[in-house]
Image: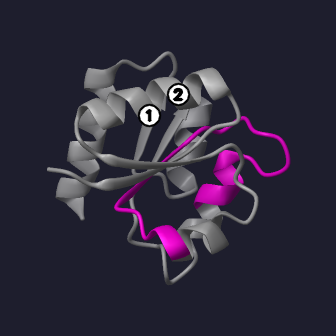
């Protein structure tokens, strides 16, 4: 299933790697290097899924996820947090913010694509 996926990560290396995984699976990818004004950016993009890092300057992924899930326009858009934060407490906090899935970096293509398939099925 081809989907439009927004990827948000301040690491250019991680951003390019995730883009490559998604494009190789024939998804349309739009990338941003930070979560500032993410809601405004999503108005134009209308993604099927958002894949987002947690540790970013300015506005972290937990904050952005919580804000998306409390916004009527985006509350049904699945959010996958993809981060180096690997503690169980981090995963729990991600769930509390509304994340539909939580992946720990380094992530491989299979795990990412499986998570996307899973969250889209749950919609």
Q: Please tell me in which quadrant of the rendered image residue 108 appears.
A: top left
Q: Quadrant where the C terminus lies? A: bottom left
At which x and y percent is residue 8? 59, 45
Looking at this rendering, what residue extends furthest in the bottom direction? Answer: 72
Residue found 65% across the figure and 73% down from its top: 40
Residue 48 within the magenta-colored segment of the rendering: yes
In front of the other: 51 or 122: 51
- Assign a secondary structure to mark 1: helix
Residue found 48% across the figure and 67% down from its top: 45
Residue 114 left/right relative to 75 = left
- Label 2: how many Cα within 10 Å (few below 14, some 14–19, many 20+): some
Color style of the picture: one colour
Q: Which mark is residue 16?
A: 2
In front of the other: 92 or 42: 42
At which x and y percent is residue 27? 28, 45
- Assign a secondary structure to mark 2: helix
Residue 51 within the magenta-colored segment of the rendering: yes
At which x and y percent is residue 59? 78, 52
Q: CA distance from mark 2 to mark 1?
A: 5 Å
Question: Eyeballing the image, is 113 above or below 122?
Answer: above
Question: Eyeballing the image, is 27 above or below 21?
Answer: below
The part of the chain drawn in magenta is 44-65
- Residue occupied by mark 1: 19
At which x and y percent is residue 26? 23, 41
Q: Can residue 88 be seen in the rendering of this structure?
A: no
In front of the other: 53 or 102: 53
In front of the other: 5 or 91: 5
Residues at discs 2 and 1 in contact (Cβ within 8 Å): yes
Residue found 55% across the figure and 54% down from its top: 96
């Amino acid at each position: 299933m081809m989907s439009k996926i927004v990827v948000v990560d301040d690491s250019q290396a991680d951003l390019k790697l995730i883009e490559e995984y998604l494009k190789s699976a024939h998804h349309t990818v739009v990338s941003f290097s930070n979560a500032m004004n993410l809601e405004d950016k999503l108005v134009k993009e209308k993604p099927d899924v958002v894949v987002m890092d947690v540790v970013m300057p300015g506005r972290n992924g937990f904050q952005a996820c919580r804000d998306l899930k409390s916004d009527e326009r985006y509350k049904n858009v699945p959010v996958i947090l993809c981060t180096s934060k690997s503690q169980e407490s981090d995963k729990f906090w991600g769930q509390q913010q509304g994340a539909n899935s939580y992946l720990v970096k380094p992530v491989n293509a299979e795990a990412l694509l499986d998570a996307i398939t899973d969250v889209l099925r749950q919609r």
